[in-house]
Every structure is written in structure tokens, then in C-alpha cells.
Image (cartoon, rainbow, N blue to C red):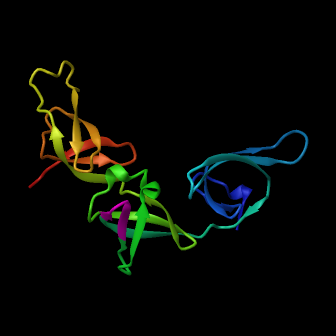
Amino acid sequence: MFSTSDFKKGLRILYKNEPYVVLDFQHVKPGKGGAFVRTKMRNLITGFVREETFRSGEKFDDPSVERKKMQYLYKDDAIYFFMDQETFEQVGLNENQLEDILSFLKEETVYEILYFMGKPISVTAPLFMELKIVEAQPGVRGDTAKGGATKPATLETGLVVQVPLFVNEGDTVRVDTRTSEYMERVDSK
């Protein structure tokens, strides 16, 4: 059980029988009347962001969400199959449940799946992924006026990122999955 005094960014609460995560909050103590908390929170199932005002001291239940490490196996029609790393049970998810990470889906990679009441509600990719470049134009010597020139490169998952000119087709690069940005080229020994 959580009270409004326990609110902090990232806190998960059960509001109207759905799990929410607190994105931002502000305790307000007006000169007249009781204190209250303005809250901005995101529904973990739908992704909808809403702003609510709660009386100070109002209580909320823990949504009892569960995190599981699951390996991506394959895609069959419009269903993406994942396997639990402990029980070897397989779960099929549709594109709507994966829209945030579709450009980072790679077979045999382990993802974190969030469950609410026994149902998967969201999938999180690892913070950094190593992906192979399948298409990139060769960098031309002299293209760098200030030394920071980049070019587009298509990765094995279909994601297009900007990479430095020295990175070539066939190289493996590390990408930040939160920003979809190139981090570094990985030595392929």
C-alpha cells in the first residue's frame, strides 16, 4: 500500500484497477484548504499518459507486476514468440505490444517482459545492443570538414542510424536502445 507521500518518479501504483507508473508529481499546500498532489502518470498497459490530482494521504495498492527475462525466438505471421529463461514456456505477442522495440528485435536476444495479472503488458530491450550493419555507403576521404561527419547505415533489424564515416558494411556496432543512437564500433575478432 502506497500513500501520496511515498510518490517518486518510477513508482508503480494501481489506479482504477490498472497499473500506472508515476512520471512526475508535485506536492501542493495551498493557503486555504487541504494539501494535494498533482501527478502525471502513464498507464503500463495502454501507454496513455494522464494527469490526476489526489488528496494528500490518499492510498494506492501495489499493482504487483512481475518481470521475466525472456528470449526472442521467431516471428510467425504477426505473432512474435518469446521463451521464458527459467520455465522454457513460450509466449506469443503481437506487434502492438512490441511497437517500442520492433526495431531492436533480434533472434536469441534476451528481453525483459513485464506481466500484470499473469498477462504480458510490455517488453523492454537491453540498454545496449550489438547489431551488424547490412547496408552503408562507403565513406569518402575529404568528406569531413570538421571531423564529425556521419552517414546513414541500415542495421540487421532494419533500423537506420547515423554512424561515423569509418564504419563500413559488415561491421558490428553498439546502439543505445533508449535513443536509437550509435555508441561505438565493436571489435569483431
Q: Is residue 24 visible?
A: no
Q: Quadrant of residue 133?
A: top left
Classify the position of the C terminus by image quarter. bottom left
Q: Is residue 7 visible?
A: yes
At a point 32% along the width and 52% down the height, the residue shown is 104
Q: Is residue 152 left or right of residue 5?
A: left
At a point 42% along the width and 56% down the height, the residue shown is 95
Percent x, y of residue 183: 27, 43
Percent x, y of residue 44: 56, 57
Is 156 above or below relative to 75?
Answer: above
The rendered magenta stretch, by its main secondary structure, is classed as strand
Please tell me whether residue 80 belongs to the stretch shown in magenta. Answer: yes
At a point 12% along the width and 46% down the height, the residue shown is 170
Q: Quadrant of residue 3?
A: bottom right
Q: Which residues are magenta?
A: 75-82
Is 52 above or below relative to 113?
Answer: above
Name the residue at the right extreme.
32
